Image (spheres, helix red, strand yellow):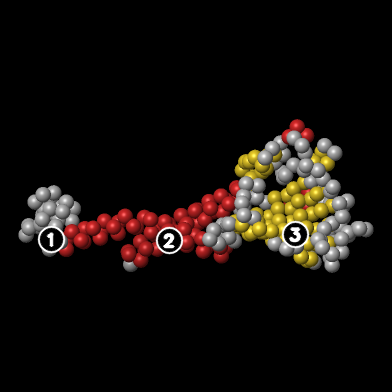
Amino acid sequence: MARVRRFTMLAAVYLLLGSVVSVAVAWGFAAQFPWTYWGVEIGDREQVSGFDQTVPAWAWKAMGSPRRQPELFARSGYTAFGVTGIEVEGWPRSVGSTPFDAEPIEPVMSDELILSQRSMFGWPVRALERVEFRYFTIPFSEPESLSQIDRWREGFPWVQDGNIAPEDAHDGWYVFDRANGAYPYPVRLPLRPLWLGMAANSMFYGAIIAALVATPGLIRRAIRAKRVRAGLCPSCRYPRGVAAVCSECGEKLSA
């Protein structure tokens, strides 16, 4: 019974450590994505009937509730090492909008554009996700220098007529700004767990930690057993006699 309790406690400890490592790995990918990341593959855009999730109240509030609701939508995916994401663009229908049977699917450059982005991070399985909504009034232009804008933590600093045009809404944990060329970009770490991925990664990393902890002890036991089979003291390798204690180092010898 004591052995079962000890095994259960050790398993719980290693799972906890594995979950900590899983979160740290996911946050590491999130801190690098997208502006200092590599190997990002963007999938084809396709027509969809709406956003892949309901726009939450906090996002509408942060975006200032666009004047017109989006009616046309296009979805694309993106993948990279440790990252998977889905991006849905929505814009109001207006004269001149590109029909869906034309390529590419794009809004006219006089509409509002609402972008929904769901990014999932982790390895070997995605364990955490971050949701982001952006509202753009386009056309927008990129500033030539930081003198045109203040340090802005709420999204990539696009400006229009010298003023910040879009407002962003995120549910990630803001930690710091990192440089993207000349512009500061806010790093937000995902907080939403993907429970199956988190469980799989916790077991994966927990098993690795358990193996790293147990390996030195197993090696020592194998070395001592080899010395005993060779008729040597398992501690100092001195030839053992018939005494119960090694005459060289005092190690207690089994029969």
* Disc 2 packing (10 Å; few <14; some 14–19; many ≥20): some
Residue type, mark 3 in image: Val
Closer-to-camera residue (250/178): 178
Pointer 3 or 1: first along the chain? 3
What residue did someone put label 2 on? 207
Asked whether, in this view, residue 210 is left or right of residue 187, the answer is left
Residue type, mark 1 in image: Gly
Residue type, mark 2 in image: Ala
Q: State whether residue 22 appears in this view.
A: yes
Q: Position of residue 179 (x, y in %)?
A: 65, 40
Element class at badge 3: strand
In this picture, is 175 found above or below 24?
Answer: above
Asked whether, in this view, residue 220 is left or right of residue 191, the answer is left
**What is the C-alpha distance between the residues marked 1 and 2?**
35 Å
Pointer 2 or 3: first along the chain? 3
Residue depicted at x 29% and y 57%: 219
What residue did someone put label 3 on? 88
* Disc 1 packing (10 Å; few <14; some 14–19; many ≥20): some
Q: Quadrant of residue 240?
A: bottom left
Q: Quadrant of residue 120?
A: bottom right
Q: Position of residue 185 (x, y in %)?
A: 67, 42
Quadrant holding the N terminus: bottom left
**What is the C-alpha distance between the residues marked 3 and 1?**
72 Å
What residue did someone put label 1 on? 231
Residue depicted at x 82% and y 58%: 106
Q: Please tell me the numbered disc located at residue 91.
A: none
Q: Position of residue 57 (x, y in %)?
A: 76, 54
